[in-house]
Amino acid sequence: MNRIEIRELTKDHGTHRVVDHLTFDVLPGRVTGFLGPNGAGKSTTLRLLLGLDRPTSGTATIGGSRFTDLRNPLRQVGVLLDPQAAHAGRRARDHLRVLAVSNGIPPARVDAVLEQAGIAAVAHRRVGTYSLGMRQRLGMAAALLGDPAVLLLDEPTNGLDPEGIIWIRELMRGLAAEGRTVFVSSHLMAESAAFVDHLVVLGQGKLLADTPLEEFIDARSTPGVRLRTSEPERMGAALAREGFELVAADDGRWTVEGIRAERIGDLAVREGIPVLELADERASLEQAYLDLTAGRAPFSATAA
């Protein structure tokens, strides 16, 4: 199995507890977003999972094994933690060739992932000449090199242009659709909402949420509908009979709180009221996230 299993994972730095008895699974076949304020323990959790740090207690395994026990780790786990990790004086193709040889990966994979990441034309250049976005693409090429079943990605869209962001979004969803495990740490809420299926949220080292994206947002949204109709008086009267109020919005539309669009649609059909626009209103991922993590961010700015 290629699932990630975190069990009672704890990490203390002196008297400060960075990760506090975390337990959750990251399952194959979906993109799992890893969210939390700065200082929440996300980076430490990833370091513990990759054997870059030792836990105070608990375990973090991939497919039932510790990362450090994997014989050829790049063939099982693709990792993007730091786009600056490649040596600046080494050519991009040579960087990948070294990784391939060290993990028993066929040389043909180097050119394949360079093409996939869109940097084959500049693979002869030294990494030090690359922009941040180009380094990010090289980091993704390295993560994909071993055709792994598990991918751990930290801020994968950082520094990418719009085309690159679309590419990485479609790539992650495609990898998950193939049955791979995709675990993505990010601070970009709007971007995360475009590709994440499931969320794991930390706050002050503790697990705050482990839930599907839609359920996470719905749990922090008040039901409401925005609509346009050519007969607002009739619509208002019909809604009043059902115990709801039609309220004028600033943009010429109308809003109704405490109801779903499907129910208003049924009501409009039954009453013969024309509806020009009808949509549910719900919180964004960013709003739901801020609602959950309020008061749990160790670093926050004050208003000017």
Image: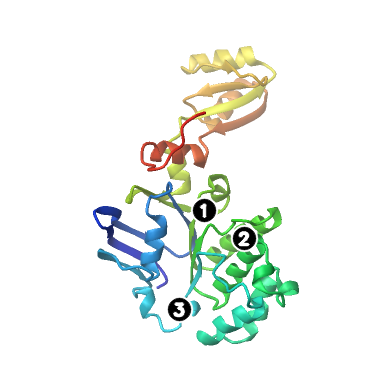
Q: Nearer the viewer, residue 3 or 78?
A: 78
**Left or right: where does residue 251 sit relative to residue 98?**
right
N-term-proximal mark, 1 vs 3 = 3
Alpha-carbon distance for marks 3 and 2? 22 Å
Asked if residue 104 is positioned above or below residue 290 in the image, the reply reads: below
Q: Quadrant of residue 236?
A: top right
Asked if residue 195 is positioned above or below residue 238 in the image, the reply reads: below
Alpha-carbon distance for marks 1 and 2? 12 Å
The spot of residue 83 in percent (x, y) is: 57, 65
Q: Amino acid at mark 3?
A: Pro
Would you say residue 84 is visible in this rendering?
Answer: yes
**Left or right: where does residue 25 sit relative to residue 281?**
left
The spot of residue 100 in percent (x, y) is: 56, 83
Q: Amino acid at mark 1?
A: Val
Asked if residue 217 is positioned above or below residue 54 in the image, the reply reads: above
Q: Nearer the viewer, mark 1 or mark 3?
A: 3
Q: Residue at x 55, y 81 (%)?
A: 99
Q: Residue at x 39, y 39 (%)?
A: 292
Q: Nearer the viewer, residue 211 or 103?
A: 103
Q: Secondary structure at mark 2?
A: helix
Alpha-carbon distance for marks 1 and 3? 25 Å
Residue named by callout 2:
168
Residue named by callout 1:
196
Q: Amino acid at mark 2?
A: Ile
Would you say residue 269 is visible in this rendering?
Answer: no
Q: Secondary structure at mark 1?
A: loop
Q: Residue at x 68, y 66 (%)?
A: 130
- Which image quarter holds the N terminus? bottom left
N-term-proximal mark, 1 vs 2 = 2
N-term-proximal mark, 3 vs 2 = 3
Residue named by callout 3:
73
